[in-house]
Amino acid sequence: MRLRLTLKATSTNQISPNYNYALSAAIYKLLKFGSAEFSEFLHENGYKTKGKTYKLFSYSLRFEKIRFNNSAIELVSPNVFLFVSSPLVDEFIKNIVIGTLRSKKIEIFTNRIKTEFSIEQAELLPEIDYLQNMKFKMLSPMVLSTPKTFNGKQAQYYFRYDDNIEMINKVLNNNLINKYKLIYNKDYNGGTVKLSWDNVYIKRQINKNKRISKKISITKDMNNIIDVIGIQTPFTLEGNPELIKVGYQCGFGEKNSMGFGMVEEVR
């Protein structure tokens, strides 16, 4: 299920470009108004399988009108839209709604910029139909990675759009199947999905010298910064609608609870 929160900046017309961690913390704070126990569980523990942890929600912050300077995003319009999605209706969505009614505001504080938003409206968006062939565009970049050895040390390699598509699909399907098991508390026995990037979009962006893969910094504080690579191109998925639904509701790829992998259907 998906929520759209209409926000209005009330304190400043600036927000840090590295807002992911701070906004994730603000979402946990909203969740706490509905259920302090669930908020703490999700933040501190999450759902675990095969040595991996999943929070089973994603979000995306969309701006009405902005411009960039060297250190901040300037809000030309104070209106901002926060999309939040999760398959956990009773535990997550309902408690977020309670949080919006009780708190009526969101604060994002990072890189010494504190931005306050009033929550003007919260609305449930209608569920989409899940089909065997669907096209999506990114509301926030998709992050996919695999362990690799660099100079004798193992580290995470973040896929770019032009990496081996079979490896990308393998990592994507493993991620979706793990989430399916956690959501439904049973093994997944269906077919996989196949992702194809929008090559027309990629060619157009390259011709305009615009980025398709993007480095994003997740900033807890100035001494704790994690850089990840996200892919921003639209894509098509063919395969089992059950897995497509998992990705749409939880977010595709990794680090969904930090604001990555949320999509919108293209019709």
Image (cartoon, rainbow, N blue to C red):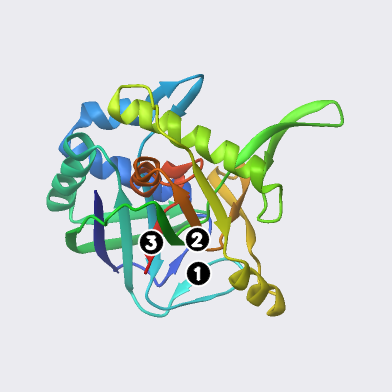
Looking at the image, tell me whether mark 3 or mark 2 is earlier in sequence order: 2
Residue 148 vertical position relative to residue 19 in the rendered view, above or below: above
Badge 2 local density, few (<14 within 10 Å), some, or many (20+)?
A: some
Q: Which mark is residue 73?
A: 1
Question: What's the residue type where badge 3 is placed?
Answer: Glu
Residue wearing tag 2? 16
Question: What's the residue type where badge 2 is placed?
Answer: Ser
Q: Residue at x 59, y 56 (%)?
A: 231
The picture quadrant where one finds residue 212 is: bottom right
- Between marks 3 and 2, how big is the CA–CA gap? 24 Å
Q: Residue at x 44, y 69 (%)?
A: 14
Judging depth in this view, the residue of 160 and 104 nearest the camera is: 160
Q: Secondary structure at mark 3?
A: strand
Residue 51 vertical position relative to residue 6 in the rendered view, above or below: above
Looking at the image, tell me whether mark 1 or mark 2 is earlier in sequence order: 2
Residue wearing tag 3? 264
